[in-house]
Amino acid sequence: MNRLKKICVFCGSSDGNDPAITEAAVSLGGEFVKQDIELVYGAAKIGVMGTIAQTILDNQGRVIGIIPGFLKVKEVVHEGLTELHTTKNMHDRKLMMQEVSDGFITMPGGFGTLEELFEVITWQQLGLHEKPIGLLNVNGFYDELIAMLSTMVDRGFLSLENFNLLIVDDSITGLLKKMEAFKAPQKPKWLNPERT
Ligand code: AMP
């Protein structure tokens, strides 16, 4: 059983146009507080990112923000976080997010969200970490992405074993349960964090 004390959430810096996604961000924040899980995220007060952070803070939970210096502008950064870390660049930000978190959840978002998801899952594919990676498929948002990943398996670019690294669920409690039960397949560790 993985004890998930800190979970990093990757999600949109926009709100999107489906109210179910904002509702899911509020529910995820509520569940983190209920289960005493700290949020690690990109430190913005905007979009789905801002909604989940604000929900947790409003309910006396803990939020750790990690932001690169160039994004630390008043219109973006949330100034009321429990902890705020500033990094030199995006690469250092993502490495720190990976190091301090016990697992990762991706909610709906855009390019930034997908980039973070695929980097963290690629690191796991390479054996750099063994932390669970969940995809919260709110309202079928990621159905086509999951279908694309299946195509990659069918066409021989992605092994079924690596496809199965991604834990998918449409319910928050279902996803958290699967993440707690996740066991990474054993792989040779041929890279170390200095080489990410
Ligand atoms: P996107 O999905 O393109 O909206 O990007 C959201 C993801 O990229 C988040 O998980 C953040 O870590 C990062 N990101 C993108 N834009 C921002 C921003 N304005 N402030 C902080 N982080 C951002």
Image: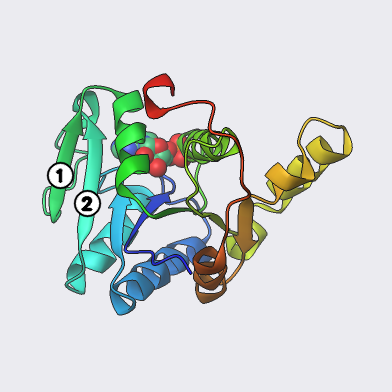
Q: CA distance from mark 1 to mark 2?
A: 6 Å
Q: Is residue 13 visible?
A: no
Q: Which residue is mark 2?
A: 64
Amino acid type of the residue tagged 1 in the rendering: Leu
Answer yes or no: do the residues labelled 1 and 2 have beta carbons within 8 Å? yes
Above or below for 158 versus 47: above
* Rendered-image quadrant of the C terminus: top left
Which sits earlier in the primary sequence, circle 1 or circle 2? 2
The residue nearer to you, when weighing 62 against 79, is 62
Q: In the image, residue 126 lies at what x, y percent?
A: 57, 32
The residue nearer to you, when weighing 62 against 165, is 165
Q: In the image, residue 92 lies at what x, y percent?
A: 30, 27
Structural crowding at the residue carrying mark 1, measured as other residues with C-alpha within 10 Å and reported as few (<14), some (14–19) or many (≥20): some
* Residue 127 located left or right of residue 11: right
Which element type, helix, strand or loop, lies under badge 2?
Answer: strand
Amino acid type of the residue tagged 2 in the rendering: Ile
Q: Is mark 1 within 8 Å of ligand 1?
A: no
Q: In the image, residue 6 lies at what x, y percent?
A: 32, 58
The way the protein has been coloured in the rendering is rainbow
Which element type, helix, strand or loop, lies under badge 1?
Answer: strand
- Name the residue at 31% across, 67% down: 37
Q: Which residue is mark 1?
A: 84
